[in-house]
Structures are given as C-alpha cells and as structure tokens.
Image (spheres, helix red, strand yellow):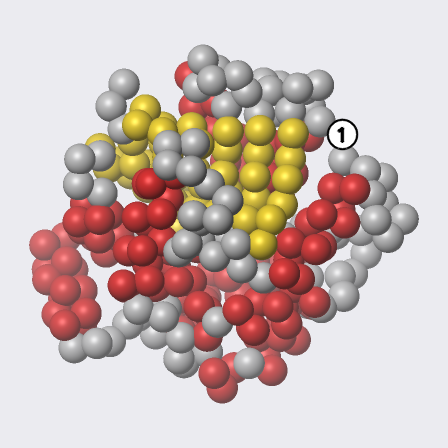
Amino acid sequence: MAALRRTLHLASLAAGTRRTVAGHMAPILQQLQRTGRWVMRVLASSAGSLAGSCLADRSLWDKLHAQPRQGSVCTFDWFFGYEEALGLLLPLLEKSRAACPPRVLDVGCGTSSLCTGLYTKCPHPVDVLGVDFSPVAVAHMNSLLEGGQGQTPLCPGHPESSLHFMQADGQNLQPLASSGSFQLVLDKGTWDAVARGGLPGAYQLLAECLRVLSPQGTLIQFSDEDPDVRLPCLEKGSQGWTVTVQELGPFRGITYFAYVVQGSD
C-alpha cells in the first residue's frame, strides 16, 4: 500500500497536480476554529485564490498577520507550538552545547511560539534567529520581543540566550547567514507553503537550509504531510545527509511528523 501511495503521488506530480486545498487546509482550519477567529476572516476572504499557489504568496501572509488579535494571544502556531516540540528540541540543543550558545534558525517563523519559547523557556543558552518573508510578521514579533503595545518585554530563560527577528526569504538566506553557521534549523510548515508554488521553490528552500546548517547540525521539518510523500523529496534534495522521520502527537486528534535531516557526527 505504501508503494502504491508513492506511485500515485509521483504520477500526480508528473501531471502537475497537487493535493487539494481542502485536504491540505483541513487540519489548519480545525486548529483555527479552536484557537481564534481572526485568521478565519483572512482565509474566508481569500477562499477563491486558495485553489492556486497563494500559500507561497507573501501578500496573503501579510494580510493574515495584519489582522488584529483577540484577547491576550500574541502568537499563532500552525500545527502546534513550542511545548509540543520541546521533547524533540531539548536533546538536540543539549547535544549542540559544544557551540556555546548553539545557533538556531527558524525559517518562515511567522508569528509562531517556537522562537519565543526557545528564548524564554529553554534552560540552555541559545542564540535564536527567526526569519520570515512577511515584514508584518517580523514587525509583530519584534514588538512582542521588545514589549511594544503595552506588553512586557520577553525575558530569556538563560542569561546568555538571545533572540532576533529579521525579514528574509528562506529561498535566499545569503544576505544574513554564512554557510554552516547554524547548529539547528527549524521549518514548521514552511516547505508545505512554499511547495504550493511548485516543488522547485521547495527544493531551493531545502538547499538554503542545508547550506547554512553546520556539517554536524540538524534540520527539522515539521509537517502533517505523509512520509510516503515527503521522504522521497527530502532524500532527493539531501544527498549526503541522513534523513529520518518521527511521529509527533496526536495533538488535538492530529498526527504530525518531524522530518529530521542530519549531518555526520
């Protein structure tokens, strides 16, 4: 059955088709219904364009991140947040303590709690950089970090930890990151969004993540995409690296996957 699913997927790629938006967005829409309605307005107003490649379109994300938030919710997570990823991330950071502090890159960070959670809750020193191509998302996260709009500035969980947010395209990290400069690179749903615009863009994203990753480092892609779909792509684009997958969850009834790409020890 796995081989049949992989064959069907490869056939669909050759025909230029992709997974339907309804299927791709179902887990996200379920989370949105539980966590707030502010994003639902954006998706509803963009429903006509969701059938195309808008998940790779910066204007959609600018519009989404510009929506006023309700209550005290300052971050928004696709799939899941920092707490659910903690059990996987902390052992990797412990292993990377030879580089003190280890550098962590969250590519396509949006307004997720991954960066802020690592900065405020990780007991080990970490140097975290969140990048996103949406200036609206980056401005919001910098405001959150600095205590704008009446918020309390974020405090590090370790006195040697640091956190920065910058606008950048994950497919071209040359302006801000040299080769081999990060011990841990995180991608939570970014491949999924970029791939909506075509696999060449997703492969370029992967190539940039691996370029900035240290030879002994780790790249993690968090996704709800089936391993029979994602693993062949990662194996093709990560030759010379070790690719494995771990199940995460279920969280709120949904099972996710951590696709782990590692260099040699």
Report the side of 197 relative to 199 (left or right): right
Q: Residue at x 74, y 42 (%)?
A: 145
Secondary structure state at the residue bearing disc 1: loop
Is 128 placed above or below 124 here? below
Please tell me how crowded label 1 is: few (under 14), some (14-19), or many (20+) other residues with Cα within 10 Å: some
Q: Position of residue 258 (x, y in %)?
A: 37, 40
**Quarter holding residue 191:** bottom left
Number of marks in picture: 1
Q: Position of residue 99 (x, y in %)?
A: 47, 18
Q: Residue furthest bottom?
A: 48
Residue ID for mark 1: 155
**Quarter holding residue 46:** bottom right
- Amino acid tagged 1: Cys
Q: Residue at x 58, y 18 (%)?
A: 124
Q: Residue at x 57, y 34 (%)?
A: 128
Q: Position of residue 247 (x, y in %)?
A: 35, 39
Q: Position of residue 245 (x, y in %)?
A: 29, 38
Q: Is residue 189 visible?
A: no
Looking at the rendered image, the quarter that the N terminus falls into is bottom left
Is 259 placed above or below 158 here? below
Is 202 placed above or below 151 here? below
Q: Is residue 54 visible?
A: yes
Looking at the rendered image, the quarter that the C terminus falls into is top left
Report the side of 198 relative to 60 (left or right): left
Q: Residue at x 22, y 33 (%)?
A: 242
Q: Residue furthest top?
A: 98
**Quick one: 185 or 89, which is closer to the camera?**
185
Is 156 placed above or below 49 here? above
**Quick one: 169 or 52, which is closer to the camera?**
169
